[in-house]
Amino acid sequence: MKTLIFGATGNCGKYIAKYLLRKGHYVVGVGRSQIPFKSSKFEYFRGDIIDKEFFNRLPSDFDQVINLAGVQPSILEFSEKTDLEATLGEYVNVNMVGIFNILEYVRKSKIQTYTYTTSHRDYELHWSNKLFLKNNLPPAINYSGDHTMYAISKTTGKMMGDYYSEAFGIRVFNLRLPMIFLVPDKPYYLANGQRTLMPFLKVIKQAMAGETLEIWGDPKMVRDYVHIDNLVFLINACFSSKLKRGTFNVGTGEAVTTEHFIKTIKKVFDIANKCELKYRPDKYTYKCAIYDITEQVSLLSYEPILLEQMLIKIRSELNKKDLKKYWI
């Protein structure tokens, strides 16, 4: 089994590559950064998907392509606030032109299965505390939000893949991602270009230290909390299925309230039971996205990892690290 992963240096890309290697795949990774890790069955090509000539360096005999490549606000050293033109240009160049180049490579190489991870920001105006979002709702981009061009570019990348499926008979699977939870090599992301501790890891760190845990906004607001293994499951299930194409939300169907999320972090990580809870309705949060997984269950035998199991997995991974160095 030979798999090509675009975006192999990101947190999800490294995790998926290592998983496939454990399963016996030969994996080729593509990214713009330094080689993420070394393995006898892992080959890495460093380059830019904007550059058409780069693709001439790649082998072409793959069973599947997994496309995780893309630019999002959390990886940019600038933002719409600090450099509007550069930020919008990155979205267009990487998430649209770059994705077109990947699709042309897949077509010309006659690779039969292509999986694309897209953003759930295309559904932002559908987000609701009461509506479990189905896979096939029409796009509803928030044109006044701070992720507008990002959402437009990712949605365009998805639509191009759908066209290539219809026109050229490629099996195309789109997996719509909310935030994916895992223990990254480094616990930081970029907020307006500034290094910032990931919010969920910040809460976990506070719980491990017995500090006060804050419950922001509406404590009854619901959302899906999705572990990386749920994405891995759906990538494998799509490839192994007899489906010709499909778009699936990577959700859980659990609809966890903010209050339950924080209380479960306390349960899993506050070993000494020292943490107090503090409600902060003045702190605004709005990501109330929950997903209907009926099709995923019926078509792909999907069995999602739910919140508590996810946090136990994360605790196990953190326990393997030197946390004094990890949090620095």
Image: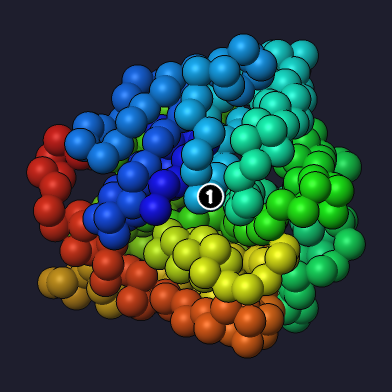
Quarter of the figure with the C terminus:
top left
Identify whether 71 is placed above or below 141: above
Q: Name which quarter of the figure residue 123 lies in.
A: bottom right
In terms of depth relative to the viewer, which is nearer, 167 or 115? 167
> Does residue 318 lie above or below 30 as drawn?
below
Q: What amino acid type is highlighted by mark number 1?
A: Gln
Residue at (53, 83) in percent of width and height: 301
Q: Quadrant of residue 184?
A: top left
Residue 280 placement, left or right of 211 = right
- The residue shown at (61%, 45%) is 111
Would residue 182 appear left or right of 87 to someone viewing this image? left
User: Can you see residue 209?
Assistant: no
Locate residue 232, reporting x and y percent: 44, 61
Residue 286 location (% of width, % of height): 68, 59
| Point 62% across, 35% down: residue | 109
Please tell me how crowded label 1 is: few (under 14), some (14-19), or many (20+) other residues with Cα within 10 Å.
some
Q: Residue at x 36, y 27 (%)?
A: 44
Report whether 85 appears left or right of 254. Answer: right
Dot 1 falls on a residue whose secondary structure is strand
Question: 189 and 104: which one is in front?
Answer: 104
Q: Which residue is mark 1?
A: 64
Quadrant in the picture for residue 51:
top right
Q: Is residue 325 visible?
A: yes
Q: Position of residue 208 (x, y in %)?
A: 21, 60
